[in-house]
Image (tube, rainbow, N blue to C red):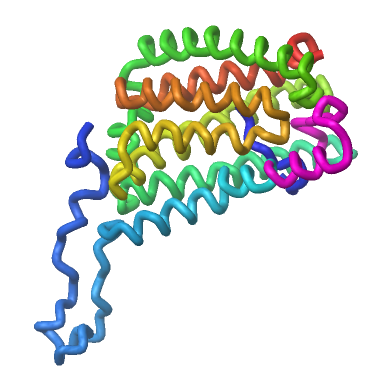
Amino acid sequence: MTPAHPDDPHRSEAGLPGDREADAPRAGAAAEGDGDGVAHDGARPAPGFGSRRADLWVQIVLVLGVSLGASALWSILNLAEVMSTLSIAESQATMNQSMSALPVFDVLRQVLSIVLALVPVLLALYFLAGSAGSLRAVCRQIGLDLKAPIPDVALGALLFLVMGLGTLALYQAGRALGLTAELTTNAGGTEWWNVVLLIAQALRHSLVEEIIVVAFLADRLLRVRWSWPAIIVGTALLRGSYHLYQGIGPALGNVVMGVVFLWIYRRTGRVMPLIVAHFLLDATGFLAGAYFFG
């Protein structure tokens, strides 16, 4: 449920956002200039935002390159290094480590890391919206709002229970089979401010993963003519790949989680239940990890 930075400094297409500008005429048309495509008043022609397939792929690469795609590459590299030196069962995966020996700077560094990690989320939402003025509208369109709090929380809690039990089962099975690293979910202390930071980290991971992997990629991949089955499989494999630093078991568990979450998003059109479920999974794992994974 948490992307890897082990070695890092840590429903149809007609209704998808961005369509309103896809076929709009380019501003400063060549008819107003001398035939070279540049307007006489010096204004550059404005491109249709995200209107071509190449534009959409560039958006996908940019968002993943500064977020979960980079995490997947680090995770794969980390797993390869572990397997070349010792067995997965002998390795350890440590999360939420202290970032400074001085408590005040530890808090400041962690808060900064949380804030900066949310920038790719804003970038993804901006690409979906096509303009800053449409951000609120696109949040409503993907169900990132408080329109249905009770159904969102109820479905999220149900997913938390089902996925949580499955995660524990896969972790224990993976440890028994030597396919999962020993997982430490809180290496930063138990002081009250660390508890607050762990909850904030859980919220960060839930927002980053569900908005980017589910809402953003589903929209962009539909626009480049991927089918829903291909999107579900592709995004599920991506979700599993950036958890490989934890071993094979957790990665497989996250692949299953990715399939279920994408299926639910397609059925409901809302990302909030997935954020709720993911937040509950990570918050529980971070705060009670010693009990569940010890």
Left or right placement of residue 142 versus residue 212 in this view: left
**Residue at 77% in and 46% down:** 7
In the image, residue 248 above or below residue 137: above
Tell me where residue 193 sits by quadrant.
top right
**Residue at 15% in and 87% down:** 33
On-image quarter of the N terminus: top right
Closer-to-camera residue (24/71) = 71
The reply to whether the magenta stretch includes residue 79 is yes
**Residue at 72% in and 35% down:** 245
Closer-to-camera residue (120/56) = 56
Residue farthest to the bottom? 34
Left or right placement of residue 94 versus residue 251 in this view: right
**Residue at 30% in and 26% down:** 269
Residue 237: percent from left, percent from top: 52, 35
One can see residue 200 in this view: no
Tell me where residue 292 sits by quadrant.
top right
Closer-to-camera residue (229/124) = 229
On-image quarter of the C terminus: top right
Q: Which residues are magenta?
A: 76-99
